[in-house]
Image: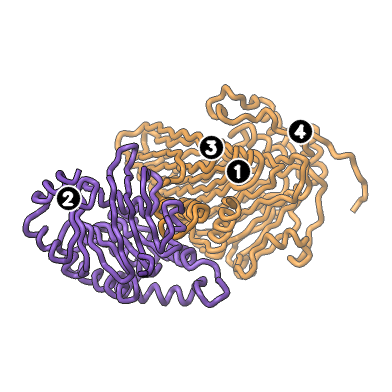
Amino acid sequence: MSETPLFQVENLHAGIEGEEILKGVNLTINRGEIHALMGPNGSGKSTLAYIVAGHPNYEVFEGRVLFKGENVLELGAEERAQLGMFLAFQYPTTIPGVSMANFLRLAVNSVRGEDDGEGGKKRIAPREFRRMLREKMKMLNIDESFATRYLNEGFSGGEKKRAEILQMAMLEPEFAIMDETDSGLDIDALHTVSEGVNKLYDNNMSMLLITHYQRLLNHIKPQFVHVLMGGRIVRSGGPELAEELEAKGYDWLKEVAGAAS
Amino acid sequence: MEASVQEATKGFSRRAAEELSLRRGEPDWVRELRLSAWDTYESIPMPKRTDEEWRRTDIRRVPIDKVQPFTELKNKVTSQSELSSDIQSLIPTDVEISGMNVQVDSSVVFTTVEESVKSQGVIFSDLPTALQEHPDLVKKYLFGAVPVDDNKFAALNAAFWSGGTFLYVPEGVHIEVPFRSILRNQTPGASVFSRTLIVAEEEASVVLVDHWNSAEGEDLSLSCNVVEVHAEEASQVRYIQLQDWGRNMWSFNTQKGNCGQDAQLNFLNVALGAKFSRSNISGMLNGAGSLAEMLGIYFADETQHIDHLTRQEHVSPYATSDLLIKGALKDRSRTVYSGLIKVHPHAQRTDAYQSNRNLVLSRNARADTIPNLEIGANDVRCTHGATVSQVEEEYIFYLMSRGINRTEAVKLIVDGFFDEVIERVPVDEVQEFVRQAIARKIGL
């Protein structure tokens, strides 16, 4: 008997405003794995990310999303994060007046939770927090002034993406979904961000990379690649599948998708 | 002191104004002013809902006939340690001040000024003392910014003012460390009619933090205050008002700043308390190149009614006014904002900005906001904006996706909402006070 998978999507039917976008998605990710989810625009990749994170506008019609064996669809968004899940958004929200540092301190403490009295999760001391923040910012080549800036306000596209990865690095999730994290990053930034992500991977973070380009996958190497089209995973394979997609595009898979429906 | 206990008079009358003046032993000219102000008060009709400025604010239940118009004069104490502990608790510790004036109901009970400030010619005292010691100086400015007939409640203040603060900074003197004034309603059912007069001569600069507070009580109290600021040529005056009255208070405030050429006026009005609060705030850009920054924060809860009426009056060219007032509402509270930018025909190159933002945290709360422009010149830049909105669900989701629970997320967003105003006020103890007050108010 193998151990419970870290993350599982079972026959997920879901959408927004009554429209079904995901039409029976199945996906299993074990601890220590990196998966890539690829697919053309509008295939439902971001919908899957939002559903997993618990966005209130999306509806689930059928199926389950399990994290460490628990159906997270029954939990609030904050509880999912507290369990160790993280979504790096494709389009992070700007929140005026809320400084990055204040927000991160609250987030880190929320995820760590109250002191459990057994030497496990506990609140972070202010000094330790500042040290950790400086260290992670340095790792991601983020200017220290970021800490005092308002959350994503006036950030460039690339800065927003880096800020997402900074949050991920601070929260140290066990499982992260990165939604188009590579878009908006120039080559240097992509390199820095990838290095940071790889370090987190080495530190026991599993992940699902959502992208429609090969570019990111040259830096963060998945063991598994899936193609989402028309709300279903139409093909799964190893890293070579991503290369095939890069060379041939998605059209050749349309017939497969058509045949499946 | 004579120990005559007199039946406290209730309600306001010409006779009561005269009695106040006689008991205070005021010179004839001051008494004449009071009586004439009473006549003015009588000649102005009580505002009604049919008046445009009062359409959304109902004052039919103002306890004007139920309160004592003034209370017996209390003796002054000579050191801060003699003040009662509840007043002492209002004084921030470890904060430097240039001087402090403490008024309890109708009486100023304590005044202190740093020697280093006094030696530069600065005058800081209660208004009655200033009238005695510097009559010509006070006469020159008193009623200069807020005339007796400015509005019904300014006229009532002119007839019944008692206590008050006078702050005068002579030419070229810069006082960076704030002055502080504490106004306390100690007796529920009494009146607080303070009058603050700030004069900054040419190129002078000064900061006054005015903190209003009440003892607990059920009986309705009435406060009718006036704040007059004269910022002369190239001077800078920052006036901060922290209105934290008890919930038994009906509060009226008329506040006006006159800006001379190149003068800079910075207002911050924070409205937290009172059952009913009406603040009438004006920046008069009388001098060319002057600047008026008018900031405000209000946070209404329970059944509070908080009303702001503002005016940015551009009389001269090249002047700038920048108004940003943000409010949050909870429970069944109600707020009204109505503001006018008025640009006179000669005020070319005016740059005026007016913004009122409301965050409604409850289904049963209601915010009204009415911005107005009246532009008589043709080469001006005027922008105004008004919003009433709820906390964005997208913001809440984003924060929750980082492990923060809904309540904490809303707190963070509301804090952030007000932070844009708070961070523009470079007085640490004020920033801290306001942040704590907001946290207390959010309370969720």
Do marks 3 and 1 share a subunit? yes
Say which residue appears at 37% left-offset and 58% top-offset: A151
Q: Are marks 4 and 2 in contact (CB under 8 Å)?
A: no
| Residue type at the position of mark 1 | Asp
Q: CA distance from mark 3 to mark 1?
A: 12 Å
Number of numbered discs overlaid on the protein picture = 4
Q: Identify the residue position indicated by label 3 in the image.
A: B363
Residue B382 x, y percent position in the rendering? 35, 39
Q: Earlier in the sequence, mark 3 or mark 1?
A: 1
Q: Nearer the viewer, residue A255 or B355?
A: A255
- SS for dot 1: loop
Q: Identify the residue position indicated by label 2 in the image.
A: A40
> Chain B drawn in what color?
orange
Residue B274 x, y percent position in the rendering? 66, 43
Q: CA distance from mark 4 to mark 2?
A: 78 Å
| Residue type at the position of mark 4 | Phe
Is residue A189 at all visible to an observer of this figure? no
Q: Are marks 3 and 1 in contact (CB under 8 Å)?
A: no
Does A28 sit left or right of B255 as displayed?
A: left
Report the residue that reaches farthest toward the left.
Answer: A247
